[in-house]
Image (cartoon, helix red, strand yellow):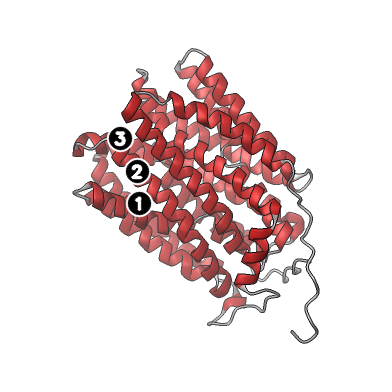
């Protein structure tokens, strides 16, 4: 059976306030990257595939580094990881502004920012929530943190649009590189006393034992498959929808408002998902979210395009946007316990980021080849149906483990 969590050492208010503020800033900035696609490619003479590939690498790097950030956070505490992530984020945004070539742009916007996001977003923050908040309120608390990331999108995307309009795309990125450093002082509120010095709390399993157990467990594999689809859909839409709308003759303001609406309604969607995760089968919640996304995309493509249809689509997608996050992570915690939660969440999230890589890169590649995003929209619909089906067989009960030998 999973380890019983230790008594909370930090107050729930402190954990949620600092964790939510960090996720708000970190996720809010990255949700606006689609606004830079056309300004950067037009100014530098690059293709959309060049930009999309760098953001695709960012998502892949986020997933790769997320595994190791989770391991370090589980072993030494999340404070060091979050501070390091804030410094990398600032460096990556500055490098993104000043990169003279596609290669250096990919290194900074892709690898540096991807590594930074690994240390400043959900997997690390959810590890703290899992350890510090009682299981009876864990799914709800994860919903609050996810809702904060959504509020960050609602708050930051219009701000980023204004910064680009008033400062230019380069100066806007430099301003954000300074703003993201606020994450570092917020990390002090998440210093867990049990991780003082180099000593970590004693655990029932080693990292490798926990990893082998999870990777062999069918329900973990199914959660990873579903999360792949989540990444594909949301990152394709988040990065390419602004350009899709401009190609269709709508103004840039419509795209900014659309992304902001996704963020606003996602505040409610993620919170509701977290609350429902305490009461209903999480696998059914996930299946509903994925099938509802497919229906929403299909209707968006079938109906005449107008600002009103864009705003309605954005509101519906917002309710479904990151609502998978608290439910998926609460499922992992419920099955395996919280001792290695940041690492296991990192592995599930790695699958999400492979999907993100495919969604954003295929969007740019197929647009450059065909002059249209239609094929990728259809792929997103089909994948949503697939994700709904694979989540239904997930077993949410705690995994049964053989008792340890006496004295082990």
Which quadrant would the N terminus be assigned to in this image?
bottom right
- Residue beneath label 1, please? 110
Q: Which residue is drawn at 50% across and 24% down?
A: 311
Task: Choose the circle earlier in sequence order: 1 or 2.
Answer: 2
Q: Count of labels shown? A: 3
Which sits in the foreground, 213 or 38?
213
Note whether residue 11 is visible: no
Which sits in the foreground, 56 or 88?
56
Which sits in the foreground, 205 or 328?
205
Q: Give percent across and percent down for residue 71.
A: 54, 68
Residue found at the very far bottom of the displayed protein = 407
Query: For the residues marked 1 and 2, what is the alpha-carbon distance in whole angstroms?
Result: 8 Å
- Residue beneath label 2, please? 53
Q: Residue at x 54, y 36 (%)?
A: 264
Q: Is 43 located above or below residue 94 in the figure?
A: above
Query: For the residues marked 2 and 3, what is the alpha-carbon distance in whole angstroms?
Result: 8 Å
* Residue 175 as seen in the image, left or right of residue 133: left
Q: Which residue is drawn at 30% across and 54% down?
A: 108
Task: Choose the circle earlier in sequence order: 1 or 3.
Answer: 3
Note whether residue 23 is visible: yes
* Residue 305 as seen in the image, left or right of residue 46: right
The image's mark for residue 48 is 3
Q: What element carries label 2?
A: helix
Q: Give percent across and percent down for residue 207.
A: 60, 71
Query: For the residues marked 1 and 3, what is the alpha-carbon distance in whole angstroms?
Result: 15 Å
Q: Is mark 1 on a helix, strand or loop?
A: helix
The 10 Å Cα crowd at callout 3, few under 14, some 14 to 19, many 20 or more, is many
Say which of marks 1 and 2 sits in front: 2
């Amino acid at each position: 059976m999973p380890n019983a969590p230790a008594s909370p050492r930090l107050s729930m208010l402190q954990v949620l306030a600092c964790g939510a503020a960090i996720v708000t800033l970190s996720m809010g900035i990255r949700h606006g990257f689609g606004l830079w696609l056309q300004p950067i490619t037009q100014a530098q003479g690059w293709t959309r595939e060049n930009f999309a590939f760098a953001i695709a690498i960012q998502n892949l790097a986020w997933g790769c580094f997320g595994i190791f950030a989770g391991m370090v956070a589980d072993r030494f505490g999340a404070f060091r990881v979050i501070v390091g992530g804030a410094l990398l984020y600032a460096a990556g945004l500055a490098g993104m502004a000043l990169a003279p070539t596609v290669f250096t742009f990919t290194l900074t916007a892709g690898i540096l920012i991807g590594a930074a996001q690994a240390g400043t977003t959900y997997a690390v923050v959810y590890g703290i929530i899992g350890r510090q908040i009682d299981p009876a309120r864990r799914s709800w608390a994860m919903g609050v943190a996810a809702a904060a990331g959504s509020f960050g999108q609602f708050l930051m995307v219009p701000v980023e649009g204004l910064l680009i309009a008033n400062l230019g795309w380069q100066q806007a990125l430099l301003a954000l590189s300074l703003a993201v450093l606020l994450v570092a002082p917020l990390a002090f509120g998440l210093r867990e006393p049990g991780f003082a010095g180099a000593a970590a709390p004693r655990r029932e399993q080693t990292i490798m034992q926990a990893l082998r157990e999870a990777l062999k467990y069918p329900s973990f594999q199914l959660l990873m498959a579903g999360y792949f689809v989540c990444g594909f859909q949301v990152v394709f839409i988040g990065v390419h929808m602004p350009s899709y709308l401009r190609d269709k003759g709508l103004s840039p303001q419509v795209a900014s408002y659309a992304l902001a609406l996704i963020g606003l309604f996602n505040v409610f969607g993620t919170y509701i998902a977290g609350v429902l995760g305490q009461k209903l089968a999480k696998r059914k919640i996930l299946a509903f979210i994925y099938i509802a996304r497919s229906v929403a995309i299909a209707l968006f493509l079938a109906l005449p395009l107008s600002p009103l249809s864009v705003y309605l689509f954005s509101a519906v997608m917002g309710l479904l946007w990151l609502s998978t996050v608290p439910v998926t992570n609460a499922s992992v915690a419920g099955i395996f316990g919280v001792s290695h939660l940041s690492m296991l969440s990192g592995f599930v999230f790695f699958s999400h980021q492979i999907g993100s890589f495919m969604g954003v890169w295929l969007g740019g590649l197929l647009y450059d080849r065909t002059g249209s995003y239609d094929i990728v929209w259809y792929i997103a619909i089909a994948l949503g149906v697939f994700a709904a089906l694979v989540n239904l067989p997930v077993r949410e009960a705690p995994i049964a483990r053989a008792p340890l030998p006496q004295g082990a």
